[in-house]
Structure formats: structure tokens, C-alpha cells
Amino acid sequence: MATEDIEITGAGETADAEALSAGTLSAETARTYPLAPGYSVNVRSGPGTHYSIVRTLPAGSSIPIRCQCPGETVTGPYGTSKIWDNIANAQFVADAYVKTGSDGYVAPRCS
């Protein structure tokens, strides 16, 4: 299964390690959420597939969710959702590819 937001690849390093080295995640960030197993996920500059791809998170990554906002509806391994997760400044991931344990918001709404 592949859509514009995913590519199937092998396992890789975690997004947390990348974010720490890039200075976009503090060591105090307590909660991270895993991406759907077997999927690498595109990180976009805004909450929709028409936004540019900033980077791609490798399969096996976990991400911090700073805030969430509504955007383009996307179908992924965890259902269909219009929620997008902000993981760093101007970096968004479709929530349908993130195992949050909820069909709704799990973080504050982005302002």
C-alpha cells in the first residue's frame, strides 16, 4: 500500500535522535508516538499532501507531537483522518500514520 504520503522501506534510526541532533526536540520531551510499522513517512511543511516534503522519517521512527491541527484528509494504516501532527517548526505528519491510540486529538491544537 503506498500513497503520496508514504513509502515502504526497511527499518532505520528514530526521529527522536534526528530531532535532538537538529536541535528541534528538547531532552525533556516525555511522550513520543511510533509510526506505523513498515512505513517511512513524509514530513511536510504544512498540513496536507500539497505542501512540500521537508524530509522523510524512516520506518521504525517515533515522533514527538507538539500540537495538532486539521488539514487535508488522509487514509493510512490507522484509518482516515484530517488531523495532522506538528513535530517541529513547519513540520507536519499525517496522523493516520501515527499510533496515538486515539481517533481524536492527543495534543493541544496548533495556534
Image (cartoon, rainbow, N blue to C red):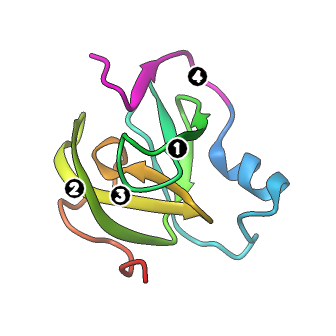
Q: Earlier in the sequence, mark 3 or mark 4?
A: 4
Task: Locate residue 84, reporting x and y percent.
Answer: 35, 58
- Between 111 and 60, the one nearer to me in the picture: 111
Verify CB contact (< 8 Å) between mark 4 and mark 1: no
- Between 100 and 95, the one nearer to me in the picture: 95
Q: Which mark is residue 84?
A: 3
Q: Amino acid at mark 1?
A: Val
Magenta span contains residue 19: no
Q: Is residue 89 left or right of residue 18?
A: left
Name which residue lies at 41% across and 60% down. Answer: 85
Q: Amino acid at mark 4?
A: Ala
Verify CB contact (< 8 Å) between mark 3 and mark 2: yes
Name which residue lies at 38% across and 32% down. Answer: 5
Quadrant of residue 61 within the rendered picture: top right
* Looking at the image, residue 71 lies above or below residue 34: below
* Looking at the image, residue 7 lies above or below residue 89: above
Gap between marks 2 and 1 measured at Cα: 15 Å
Gap between marks 2 and 4 measured at Cα: 27 Å
Q: Give the structural element (helix, strand or loop) at label 1.
A: strand
In the rendered structure, which segment of residues is drawn in magenta?
1-12
Name the residue carrying label 1. 43
Of badges 2 and 4, nearer the viewer stands 2
* Looking at the image, residue 21 lies above or below residue 76: below
Q: Earlier in the sequence, mark 4 or mark 1?
A: 4
Name the residue carrying label 2. 82
Name which residue lies at 57% across and 61% down. Answer: 90
Name the residue carrying label 4. 11
